Image: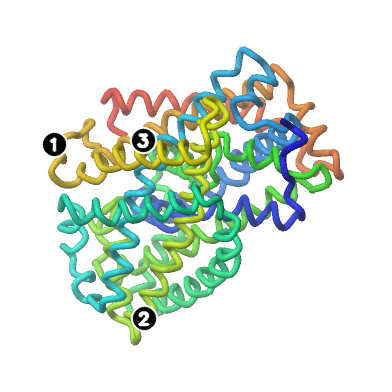
C-alpha cells in the first residue's frame, strides 16, 4: 500500500495543496463572525497565540505522524499504538459531521452569487434579506443541492487536480480583491471605531468563551484534529522541510482569515452601527454585511459578483477535499468503488444537510438548548470531537510514543528549531488546556454553565 502512494513533487506543491484545503469558508465566513461576536481584538489576540503554540505543534505532529507511518488516520493511530486506534476513528467522524453543513453554506454562497449576477444588490443589502432567505424551505435546498452536485461531479470524475490548478491563480486573485475591498471598507467614515474593535484587545471582553471559540476555530480553519493533515503528511516527501512547510501553511491561512475580518468587522460599524446585536449576528454576518459594502461601491455589482465567485472557488476546493476524505475512508474500509462511495456520501450529505438547511425554516423548532441544527453540528465537531482527538494525540505523542519519535521525523531534513518549545507544548500545555476546554464544552452542552 505504502509504495503506491504518490508524492507531492515539490515542496511548494505540498504547501499549496495543504493550504488549498485549509483555506475556505472557515477563514472567510467563520473567522469574521466569531471575531465579531467574541470581543474583536481580544479574540484576534487569543487566536494568534493559539495558532503559534497549539496550531503549530499539532500540525507538526499530524504531518509527521502521516509521513512517518505513510498511512491515513485510522491506520496511523493503530500503527503507533493499538490502544489509541479509537482516535483515528473519532478523527474520521469529523469530516462526516462537517461536510453536510459546509455544503449548506456553500449553497448560500451560490445564491448570493446569483443575486449579484442578476443585479439585485440592493435587495441583498436589505437587513431582512438573509434571514428571510434562509427561513424558506425550497430555495435554499435547491442551491444546496446544486452545490453538492458540483462536488459530486468533480469527485466522481477524479478531476480534483484540475480544480486545484485553477485555484492556484484564483486564490491569489481572491487575496488581491480582498485587500482592495478591505482598503475600501477601512477608509469609510466611521470605520475607525470598527478597526479599533478588531485590532485592539479589550481585556474586559475576555471570557472563557473567547478561548473556547478561538480554539475550535483554529482546528476548523487549519483542518486539524480530523486526520486530514495526517493524510497529507503521508503523501509528503522525506526531503521536504516539515517545520518550514507548517509555518508557511499557518501564515497563509491566518493571513486570509485576518483579511476577511478586516473586510467585514469595520463594515459592521459603518453600515450596521456596530452595536452588540449587529456584531453578534453569528453565521449570517458575512452575508448580511458584505452586500451593504458592495451596494455602497461604484461597480459594486461587478465587484461583488467576482468576489462571491472567488469565495465559491475557495469553498469548493475545501469541500471537495472534505468529500474526498469521506470517500476515501469508505473505500479503504468497505472496499467500495470510487463511484459508489461518492454517490453514497453525496446522498448522505444531501439528507443530513437538508435537515440543517430546513433547521432555519420549517424545522426551526428542532433546537439543542439555544443552538439551531447548524450550530449544533458545528459545536459537536469543533468543541467536542476535535479537542478530544487533539488531547488524545498529545497524550499519545507526549507520553506513549514520546515526542522524540516526532522530532526525529521532523529532523530528517535539517534542525528542528522549535524543538524544546514543541516538546513543552505537547507534553504539558496542550493536554491540560485541551482537557480544560473539553470540560467546559461538555458543561456548556449539558447546560450546567452559560459561557
Ligand atoms: N479548513 C477548511 C476551511 O477553513 C475547512 C475544513 C475543515 C476542511 N476540515 C477540512 C477542508 C478537511 C478540507 C478538508 O474552510
Which is nearer the eye, 412 or 345? 345
Find residue 410 and report its horizontal and vertical position in percent.
79, 38
Find residue 380 and report its horizontal and vertical position in percent.
37, 31
Q: Residue at 32% across / 28% down in the picture? A: 444
Q: CA distance from mark 2 to mark 1?
A: 38 Å
Q: Is residue 183 above or below residue 450?
A: below
Q: Earlier in the sequence, mark 3 or mark 1?
A: 1
Find residue 442 and report its horizontal and vertical position in percent.
37, 24
Mark 3 against mark 1, which lies toward the viewer? 1
Identify the element where label 3 is drawn: helix
Find the residue positioned furthest to the top.
Answer: 83
Which is nearer the eye, 392 or 196? 392
Q: Is mark 1 within 8 Å of ligand 1?
A: no
* Residue of label 3: 379
Q: Is residue 288 above or below residue 136?
A: below
Q: Residue at 50% across / 38% down in the picture? A: 327
In the rendered structure, find residue 365 and report the number of the disc placed on it.
1
Side (left or right) of 64 relative to 362:
right
Q: Earlier in the sequence, mark 2 or mark 1?
A: 2
Q: CA distance from mark 3 to mark 1?
A: 18 Å
Which is nearer the eye, 120 or 279? 120
In the rendered structure, find residue 296 and report the number of the disc placed on it.
none
Asked if residue 28 shows in the view, the reply is yes
Label 2 crowd bin: few (<14), some (14–19), many (20+), radius 10 Å:
few
Side (left or right) of 304 relative to 4:
left
In the rendered structure, find residue 302 and report the number of the disc placed on it.
2
Label 3 crowd bin: few (<14), some (14–19), many (20+), radius 10 Å:
some
Residue 366 occupies which quadrant of the picture? top left
Q: Earlier in the sequence, mark 2 or mark 3?
A: 2
Amino acid at each position: 500500500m505504502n509504495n503506491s502512494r504518490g508524492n507531492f513533487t515539490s515542496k511548494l506543491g505540498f504547501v499549496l495543496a495543504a493550504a488549498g484545503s485549509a483555506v475556505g469558508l472557515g477563514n472567510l465566513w467563520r473567522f469574521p463572525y466569531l471575531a465579531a461576536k467574541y470581543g474583536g481584538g481580544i479574540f484576534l489576540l487569543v487566536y494568534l497565540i493559539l495558532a503559534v503554540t497549539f496550531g503549530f505543534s499539532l500540525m507538526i505532529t499530524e504531518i509527521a505522524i502521516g509521513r512517518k507511518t505513510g498511512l491515513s488516520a485510522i491506520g496511523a493511530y493503530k500503527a503507533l499504538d493499538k490502544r489509541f486506534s479509537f482516535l483515528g476513528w473519532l478523527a474520521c467522524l469529523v469530516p462526516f459531521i462537517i461536510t453536510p453543513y459546509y455544503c449548506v453554506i456553500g449553497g448560500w454562497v451560490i445564491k448570493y452569487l446569483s443575486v449579484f449576477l442578476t443585479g439585485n444588490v440592493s435587495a441583498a443589502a436589505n437587513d431582512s434579506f438573509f434571514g428571510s432567505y434562509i427561513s424558506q424551505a425550497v430555495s435554499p435546498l435547491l442551491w444546496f443541492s446544486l452545490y453538492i452536485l458540483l462536488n459530486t461531479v468533480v469527485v466522481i470524475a477524479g478531476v480534483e487536480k484540475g480544480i486545484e490548478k485553477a485555484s492556484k491563480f484564483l486564490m491569489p486573485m481572491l487575496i488581491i480583491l480582498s485587500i482592495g475591498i478591505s482598503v475600501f471598507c477601512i477608509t469609510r467614515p466611521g470605520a475607525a471605531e470598527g478597526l479599533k474593535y478588531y485590532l485592539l484587545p479589550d481585556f474586559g471582553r475576555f471570557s472563557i468563551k473567547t478561548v473556547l471559540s478561538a480554539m475550535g476555530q483554529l482546528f476548523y480553519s487549519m483542518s486539524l484534529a480530523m486526520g486530514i493533515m495526517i493524510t497529507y503528511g503521508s503523501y509528503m516527501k522525506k526531503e521536504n522541510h516539515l517545520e518550514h512547510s507548517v509555518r508557511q501553511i499557518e501564515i497563509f491561512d491566518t493571513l486570509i482569515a485576518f483579511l476577511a475580518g478586516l473586510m467585514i468587522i469595520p463594515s459592521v460599524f459603518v453600515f450596521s452601527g456596530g452595536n452588540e446585536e449587529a456584531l453578534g449576528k453569528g453565521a449570517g454576518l458575512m452575508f448580511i454585511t458584505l452586500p451593504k459594502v458592495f451596494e455602497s461601491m461604484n461597480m459594486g455589482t461587478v465587484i461583488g459578483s467576482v468576489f462571491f465567485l472567488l469565495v465559491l472557488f475557495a469553498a469548493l476546493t475545501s469541500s471537495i477535499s472534505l468529500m474526498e476524505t469521506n470517500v476515501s475512508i469508505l473505500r479503504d474500509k468497505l472496499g467500495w468503488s470510487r463511484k459508489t462511495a461518492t454517490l453514497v456520501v453525496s446522498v448522505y450529505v444531501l439528507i443530513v444537510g437538508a435537515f440543517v438547511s430546513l433547521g432555519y425554516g420549517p424545522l426551526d423548532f428542532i433546537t439543542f438548548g439555544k443552538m439551531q441544527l447548524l450550530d449544533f453540528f458545528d459545536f459537536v465537531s469543533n468543541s467536542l470531537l476535535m479537542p478530544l482527538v487533539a488531547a488524545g494525540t498529545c497524550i499519545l505523542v507526549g507520553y506513549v510514543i514520546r515526542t522524540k519519535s516526532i522530532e526525529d521525523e521532523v529532523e530528517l531534513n535539517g534542525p528542528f528549531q522549535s524543538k524544546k518549545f514543541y516538546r513543552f507544548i505537547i507534553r504539558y500545555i496542550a493536554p491540560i488546556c485541551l482537557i480544560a476546554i473539553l470540560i467546559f464544552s461538555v458543561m456548556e452542552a449539558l447546560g450546567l454553565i452559560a459561557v
